[in-house]
Every structure is written in C-alpha cells, then in structure tokens.
Image: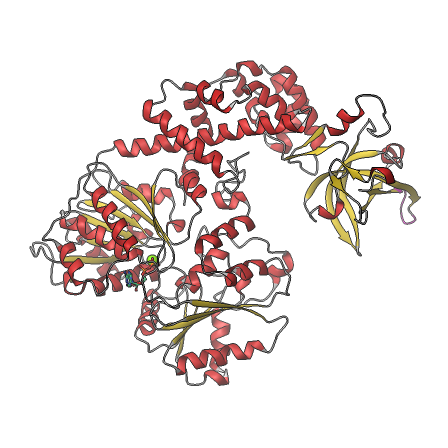
Amino acid sequence: MNAELDLALERRIGKRSAAVIEKHLGITTVEELLNYFPRRYLTRGELTPISDIPLDEDVTLIARVLSSSTRTMRARKGTITDVVISDDDGQAGLRLVGGTDYRGKVPGTLKISFFNGYRAKAELLPGRRALFSGKVTSFKGSLGLTNPDYHVLEEEPFSAGGQDAGKLAAMPIPVYPATAKLPSWKIQKVVAALLETADLASLPDPVPPAVAEREGFLPLHQAYRLIHAPETAADWKQARERLRYQEALVLQSALARRRAQLASEEATARRPRPDGVRAAFDRSLPFTLTDGQAAVGKTLAGELARDFPMNRLLQGEVGSGKTVVALRAMLQVVDAGGQAALLAPTEVLAAQHYDSIRRTLGPLSRDGLLGGLGAGDDATVQVTLLTGSMPTAARRQAMLDAASGTAGIVIGTHALLSDNVSFYDLGLIVVDEQHRFGVEQRDALRAKARKPPHLLVMTATPIPRTVAMTVFGDLETSTLDELPKGRAPITTHLVGLAENPAWAGRIWARAREEIDAGHQVYVVCPKIGTDDDGDFSPGEAEPPGLDAEESQRALASVTAVVEHLQGEPSLSGVPLAPLHGRQDPELKSATMAGFVDNTVKLLVSTTVIEVGVDVHNATLMVILDADRFGISQLHQLRGRVGRGGLPGTCLLVTALEPGHPSRRRLEAVAATTDGFVLSQEDLKLRREGDILGASQSGGRSTLKLLRVLEHEDVIARAREDAQDIVAADPFLSRHPELADAIEKYLNPEKEAFLERG
Ligand code: ADP
Ligand code: MG
C-alpha cells in the first residue's frame, strides 16, 4: 500500500477544498482525485457548436457573449440579467477555427437568465469568451441554459496578438464530470492544487518497466500531470493512452490470476465411458450434431476428464442447440458416478428443460419413483426437477434424491441454492442463460460440492469479444455460431401504430391465418395487469432512453389483452391462455403443457417465455409495446418462433411516433437476425455502466478510461501481458505494485461485481 495514494485529501489541498470535493464528488483520498479524469477537453480557441450539445444533460461549453441586458422584475424585488451567448466567433475572417468549419452553419445561440446577476452583468460583456456550464433546455423553440455557471476565459486569444496567442488558442481545457453545484473549472482548480502538493514521484507504478518501455509510455507521475493539466492535445492523448493501458492491465491481471487460481484447484476427473448413458444417448440421437456442437462437445469431454475444474462459457446464438451439448456433458459426469445440476433462470424454463430432457433421453431416463436408491441400473439416469414452488412432498423427495445421489441430473432454479439442498457428489454445474445468474449464486452452488465442481455457463446473448474478455475474463469461451440445418428464417416487421392505426386489427387477422394453417402464436406484453410494474425478472434493467411521458403511457398487459382478444371477432373460437410469473406454478405448467401439445393455440404472456422455451409449431410472435424491451430481449423472444423448419414471423408493435429514439432499437432488431451484430448495437445504445452492471453495484462505474467497445486492441494487448506476467509469477511476488493495484481495483465488493453476469 502506498502512503501517498491513501492520504486524506485535506492533507494535500486543505480542509475547505477537501470538504467541497467530498460533498459533491464523494471523493476523500489523493488517489481518488488523481483518478478523477477529465471526460474530454475543449480547446480554448474553439467555440462549442451549440447544435451538437445534447439536451437536458449537464454540459460544459465555450461560447462568446453576444449581448447582455438587465431588466427589473415587476412582481417582486430584484433584477434579471439576460445574456445571449453564441457559438459564432463574430469574425468573418476567422470562420474556419481550429479545424472546425462553421461556414454554412447557422450560428447557435443560448439564452441565460441570471436572477440578481450583478456579477454576470459586470463580467459577461459582449465579445467575451467564457466557459459555461448547465443543462441545455428548450423553451418555446429557443434554447436556454438552466442552473448556469460560467468562468470567463481571461485571455482573448484572437486579440492578444504576440507570440503566444497561437499556443494559447490551442491549449486544451479539461472538462470534468461536473455537478450542478460544482462546475468543471472548480474541480480543475482543486486538482491543480493537488498536482502542486502531492508527492507524485512516489506513486507506485503497476506497469512493469519492460512493458512501459516497449510501449513508450510516459512516466506515471507525468501521465497524471498531463491528463489533468495538458498544454497540448498530444499531452493528454499520451497520458490517457498510458493510464488506459494501465487500467486494462490491472483488470486483466486480476482475471488472469483468478483463472490461474481456479485452474490450480483440484476437481474430480469425470472420464467418459464407452458403455455409458452418454454413448447410448449419442446412438439414439435423432439428428446429427452440427460441427460446432461436436467440436465443443469434444472440448468439454476433455476438460471434464481432467483433475482440475473446467470453467467454461458457452455462447451460442438462439436456437444453436446448446442444451444437447450440455446434456452430453452432464451424462458423461453421471457415467463417471457424479451428479450434474442444471440451473435455469425461471421456473417455466426449468420445467421445460425437465420435460424436454426427459423426452430427449427417452428410455434412458429413469423415473424417480420406479428407480430409487439401489436400482443399480447403469444404463439409465434419473432426472429430477427441484423448484421452490413444488408441493412440499415432491420437493422433499427431490431433495432426498439429490442428497442420496439417486438423482443423476437435478434441474432447478435458484431454489437449488437454498441451504437445505445438498448433493451426494456434485460434479458439474450447468448455468443456462448466464446473464440472469450472478456469481454469488454460482459460488453458493460450488460450495455444495466436496471438491470444486466443473462449471459450464451458457448464454444466448452474444457477447462481443472484448466484453467477454473483460466481464467474463475468468472463464474460457466456446462459441456455437452455426444453427442446425433446416432452420427456417425469421422475418421481423416493425408495426408502427402511430402512423398506421388500422394495423392493430390486421395483426389479429394475421394471427388467425397462422392458427388456421395449424400453427401457434405467441403474444408478448410488457405487463401482467393494468396496475403493476411488469414481470421483469430481478436484475433486469429497463431499456434505456425512456422519458417520463413514456413511462406514464398505458401499456399492453396480459390480462387486458386476453380480455380484448376474447372479444376479437377474427379470433373467435380460438383457444387462448394467459401465462405470467405471478400465476400458480401448477397453472403455469398446465398452460405450458397445453401450448406444447397444441391445445392452446395462442399464448398471451410476459417475458417468462423469453429464454429457452422450445415449441416447434409456433410460427408467429406478436410483441406488444415492443419499445419497452431491450434489444437482446427482443432477439431472445423472437428466437421462440421458426424453430421447427417452419418460417417464423415476428411483429414488433409500437405506439411510438416514427423517429422516436426508442424506435431505433426496434429498427435494429427488424434489420438483422445476427445476434452478434445486435449485441454490438445494444452496447452502443446503452451506457457503459449498464453493460458492466454498474447500476447494480451502487453507481460509479469501475472502468474509467477503458471503453470495452472502443479499446479492443488495448484490452487484447493487456490480456496477453497479464497472462505472461501471471504465468511467470503466479502470486505476483515480483510485481507488488501490480498486486496492490489489483487489490485496490477489486476490493471484495467490486470483485463480486466483476463476475456478476
Ligand atoms: P438454444 O441454443 O437456444 O438453447 P436449444 O438447445 O433449445 O437451443 O435447441 C433448439 C432446438 O434445436 C431444439 O429443439 C433441439 O432439439 C434442436 N437441435 C439441437 N441440435 C440440433 C441439431 N444438430 N440438428 C437438429 N436440431 C437440433
Ligand atoms: Mg437454451
């Protein structure tokens, strides 16, 4: 630990400043403030194009005062000073400023009103340039700045003349993430004071000298100086590059160390048996495995046979056939005398896995009641369902079977994690749809085995390579990128009711056509009833970009839609049923069973059917108020149709006006069925914090300079370096600065957050 880094801020910048910084930014140590980096840089000589500034966000900009006038208020005592600022430099000859071409652009103006603004009246004289901060808002068609604050730029670069004018004009002004009460330039002032007083030379450098030399990095203390107080754009760029790499290296080293730790644990080797259930299952498979399934299967078989734990992430497009891959791995473990647990995110999916795995296994699956302890039948496996809502007697029996080892495969939800469930010899944990399962749960399950079990995590939400490297960096990754042959394409249409209200009726006529052709239909709603908050699973974020007005809008609910469809002429006589998370579990399974055996033709549900549900005869999916769902959710949802060689259709229904930002998600989903393209799009539309789950970890994003989408090369280089460092020095005893940085970066609560899926 380094004394300087952990020093209380007041020791370096004084009590008063430290108190202000703590109050507004929550920052208390030298290290935290040094690492509070500018978000971007403005150039002194350039005005900020006003038309490019986002509305309703705290912004900092440079503008020129166009006019100023002061009036007395009539209703109460006091004055108002109205200042109009502009992004026009007002000098015809200097229209091309610092590479920004303003010609042809209408100059933007912003109006600012100061109540009793004596200081503003005196300082904001026409022609002056200043930094302004506030929220840009639009009122009656003209733009204004609310909660305004300003800082006059003393030197006028264009009138200063002399030699330094050019240099000064090019000088970057750091823009810090500011708050309404603490504008960027005040933060800058405090940071400048810290740079003066802090003992920067003593700061420990986590980057090994050899790497720093190879990369031509600035020394650490200089990087800190130049990122906060650059004289040229090249300064901050170089500084950023170094600090960004450093961030990536610390993160990747933490992950490399965890991988090494996991690999050094001891696990029971589960070797394949040529005469086991798996071999019999392979012979009975009604289809041939895709090349990808076969290759991943081989990898898994090899890793399960080793005496240290497998830790693998299996990514695969919706419908790529991950279940059968997992099932074969589970059977190998059962053949070797162990048990396997399959965790699903919802009870509906757990029950479906249970039914379909037993169906797939056919005679190889042994019924719990007939088998039982000592049945001694090596060529079969008992598959057991264990969920929280099962009747007590059945649940008790399932728990008994798990504990005694009678159950070879145990399928369940998080109920499997409850403390009184134990296993006889848990050899493999399969987590389906990882993005719903956090590390706490994974670890709780791991604790259920005498030795660490093998772990297979599956997700159908494609994860870009860099995110996989960052967020799931402690897992090895396999990908299934081909769909089994005979998959029919899914066509997706955006149905905009705002521009075409008549389409509302046609949707149901279309549903009728499918049903008359012998097929089935899903209708998905964002809510259960008329006055609930929806059926979102825990941890699931609302899609981004909802404004207040939109949140108020009445949304399609399962109950209301069922009622409506029962009276809908084009659907008369069609057996339809509701399905949602608040129903009684027995009713849910009965409904699902009815849909599977085609007695229920139209299912009105929430997102409970989002993942994994597999009904081949369903060909049409209607998603109502589709704008309320995120990209990956929509992609998952529509993956429920087009599964049985019948072409699928998905209708994304929205009441939003064309051009509404939330419609972009729908357009993206309608434009492609490539999950990898969509996940990139999703990341672009979401903020970084959402990707890494910062919202769950209590606010501040862990990553400062690193952007997982943009900095793929940095992450990849750092990952390689980290791997080398950890391979040569597993406990980092020769890299104490790096080890300390990892500890700091990943304090226990952050470490959990890192792995949370
Ligand atoms: P996902 O990867 O989305 O979980 P599933 O495992 O549910 O996909 O598989 C989707 C469907 O494809 C299932 O009905 C499954 O039986 C079928 N399937 C899996 N592998 C193959 C294959 N190689 N050939 C044909 N159908 C397959
Ligand atoms: Mg699946």
Instruction: Please tell me whether residue 741 is drawn above or below residue 584 in the rendered image.
Output: above
Nearest the camera: 724 or 60? 724
Q: What stretch is highlighted in magenta?
A: 74-80
Asked if residue 315 lies in the magenta stretch, the reply is: no
Q: Give percent across and percent down for residue 310.
A: 26, 41
Place residue 174 in its image quadrant: top right
Q: Which of 297 and 397 is in front in this view?
A: 297
Is residue 322 in view from this perspective? yes
Dominant secondary-structure state across the stretch colored magenta: loop
Say which residue appears at 62% left-offset and 26% top-offset.
227
What residue is drawn where x is 61% and y is 74%? 500
- Residue 78 counted in the magenta span: yes
- Identify the image quadrant of the C terminus: top left
The location of residue 426, given as percent across then percent down, is 21, 45
**Quadrant location, ligand no. 1:** bottom left
Is residue 183 visible in the rendered image? The answer is no
Relative side of 54 to 243, left or right:
right
Residue 135 x %, y %: 72, 44
168 vs 101: above or below:
above
Q: Quadrant of residue 552?
A: bottom right
Q: Measured from the top left, where is residue 595 in percent x and y?
A: 34, 73
The reply, left or right, for residue 88 in relation to residue 534 is right
